[in-house]
Image (cartoon, coloured by chain):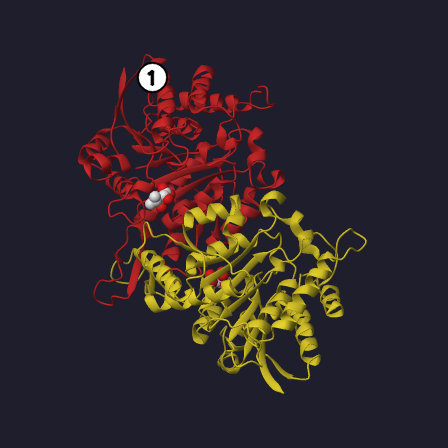
Chain colours: A red, B yellow
Amino acid sequence: KKSFRVVILPGDGIGPEVIAEATKVLELVAASSKDIDLKLETHDFGGCAIDNHAVPLPDSTLKACQEADAILMGSIGGPKWGVNSKVRPEQGLLALRKALGLYANIRPANFASDSLLDNSPLKPSVAQGVDIIVVRELIGGAYFGARKEAGVEPQEDVAWDTMIYSVAEIQRITRVAAQIALAANPPLAVHSIDKANVLASSRLWRKVVTETLQAEYPQLALDHQLVDSASMLIVASPRKLNGVILTENLFGDILSDESSVIPGSLGLLPSASLAGAPSVADYRSNDFKPTPGLYEPIHGSAPDIAGQGIANPVGTILSVAMLLRYSLGLDKPATAIETAVRKVLDTEEKGGHGLRTADLGGKVKTTAMGEKVVEVL
Amino acid sequence: KKSFRVVILPGDGIGPEVIAEATKVLELVAASSKDIDLKLETHDFGGCAIDNHAVPLPDSTLKACQEADAILMGSIGGPKWGVNSKVRPEQGLLALRKALGLYANIRPANFASDSLLDNSPLKPSVAQGVDIIVVRELIGGAYFGARKEAGVEPQEDVAWDTMIYSVAEIQRITRVAAQIALAANPPLAVHSIDKANVLASSRLWRKVVTETLQAEYPQLALDHQLVDSASMLIVASPRKLNGVILTENLFGDILSDESSVIPGSLGLLPSASLAGAPSVADYRSNDFKPTPGLYEPIHGSAPDIAGQGIANPVGTILSVAMLLRYSLGLDKPATAIETAVRKVLDTEEKGGHGLRTADLGGKVKTTAMGEKVVEVL
Ligand SMILES: CC(C)[C@H](C(=O)O)[C@@H](O)C(=O)O
Ligand SMILES: CC(C)[C@H](C(=O)O)[C@@H](O)C(=O)O
């Protein structure tokens, strides 16, 4: 019997509401297998941690995360800890990513169900069949390079940040993208995004991505796009970027958010932040190398609808699927969750399609959605 | 009689084809006014300059540009001078921007005609009424900050770029955005875009934009968006960003390209790069301060269709309108050109709408399109 520790960080706003449903799914998976023993612990993180401990990432939370096999997060932030506060929730997120070495952010943008096509802001003919996975470098570049604030000597009237990358940093994120591409059958194409016609860090990026894939994964198709051109393609003909989009931290922040509106609601999409290249073998096989990771829906804490029980828990439930696959090596239950979600969204109810929460124009509540997934599962 | 010098840089690919039509429009405006004497000179720039002079921006071209009242460019680049060449056309463009101090890039993204709505990749309900003007800082930030290539001591395996801004650089581009916002009646809202939750340069950006507008243009509405959130809004609900988007160089590169696919063809859109805040008074008034500027369509050199006479000249013709307005102070003929273009795109011909070039699914040739605009004008 294999035992796993999963730390739960419900966070702020709708975070605790969506986490409650995702936890039911996680517990069901554990209860259905005699091989697995699951230990769940909940900790303060983000705004609620600022309220209770004066910091967004308390030492006790960090320690629990460091000892965990995986972390499931809801969402953090809110007007109470806004942009003018000294201590802000997202500082905790950046610190946690860095402390755990979570260098690889995996963000799929696809339609969990074709019945959602009408919710896209893109025309159905443009959006249909979009299936993009953004692999974003998460603890390098301008986010963590040296910087200087204005108001500090010398040159008080100047501020700067450094976009910096090393060969090793680019190599390891390239390998993550390659593993994700290879997990599909046939393997996915890799689209590497940079601004090599202007930036030195992008020229290194392009060189190392090219060399690493040629040397280690020659079977994968690779192309390069400039970031401005990629931002157009995502709107104008996103299917051209189907496969894996591989990019650095800041470009990845922009492009992953841009592509995530294609499926029509941010409430649908999961994400994973990993400290290693994922392995998709089963955890019982000798091949499986567990990857510590943080899993969260891509939506924010949505203070405007918090407490109403109407948030969409699907993004968090699909995050549980990613958690099972990448950190616990449980690929089969992960796929089962994804299938159950698709069924719940697809299966015709009165309205001509499956269950819909408010973000998709429906009336189904957070708990009803979660319980339906559990039922189908 | 006032005399103006306009330098024409046809460039590469379809550049010379679209420039030929735009020049007809410019010449017609000059011929129709007894107050204006227009001197046009054509110079090599970009790939053709590399072929003829070994550099993309020959001294003679630079000198002519420095002495000109305005510059009209076609498009530059092509596979012949690709990413692996030592000398590349876009190096000339970056050098010209810097040499002339063209710090303000103005990029409208709107529908020249409602009859074009169907060409948008966005649903008509989402795209309808989008009217965005991106004001991008063009000679600061990561484009011109200190950088280090990999392969150079110390730390050969590391490359970096610096995103750097000073108070003065942010103030002057903020004033350009304010002038553009004020030229409309009622004035436009200003949406400033940054990544202030992470970057020091963005924190200075947000502070200086806020202070400058509050002190000098208190009548303008201002809000701030994070760049990741803005990249979502442009796809999901672009009308929320109607007005002026004010942003730094790299974010502006990405967001201006992203928003420019909304109107359905890159061939439709003009741009201006200015060395000062625009003034919209007539050149005969004491108020008018001419702004040296470079005007170009936003599309590339499109080597795949070059020489076939099927490129859309509308973006270049509308660039002529911007040139007349901002650099020559001829607001009335500028508006007349915009009206003529709209008529040509709108007026019902056999197909149920106006003239359409190949990029819009039509069969009208470059010259026919240009001549029709001249005729209507
Ligand atoms: C909250 C913010 C610092 C963060 C980022 O920019 O990485 C967020 O936008 C994200 O993408 O997870
Ligand atoms: C060619 C390139 C250097 C340029 C830029 O990035 O500024 C282009 O994309 C643009 O937007 O004019």
The x and y percentages for residue B367 are 73, 66
User: In this rendering, does residue B80 appear at all?
Assistant: yes
Vertically, is A334 above or below B30?
above
Against A216, is B216 above or below?
below
Q: What element carries label 1?
A: helix
Q: Position of residue B78 (x, y in %)?
A: 56, 63
In the picture of the structure, the residue carrying the numbered disc 1 is A30
Q: In this view, does A162 lie above or below A38?
A: below
Which amino acid, by three-letter code, is at mark 1?
A: Ala
Judge from the rendering whether residue B125 lies leftward or rightward of residue A230; answer left or right.
Answer: right
**For the N terminus of chain A, which image quadrant?**
top left
> Quick one: quadrant of the C terminus of chain A?
top left
Residue B268 falls in which quadrant of the image?
A: bottom right
Q: Which residue is farthest right? A: B350
Task: Report ligand 1 position as a quadrant.
Answer: top left
Which of A358 and A339 lies nearest the eye of the viewer? A358
Q: B77 or A161, which is in the foreground?
A: A161
Write down the chain letter for disc 1.
A
- Determine whether, in the image, residue A141 is placed left or right of residue B62: left
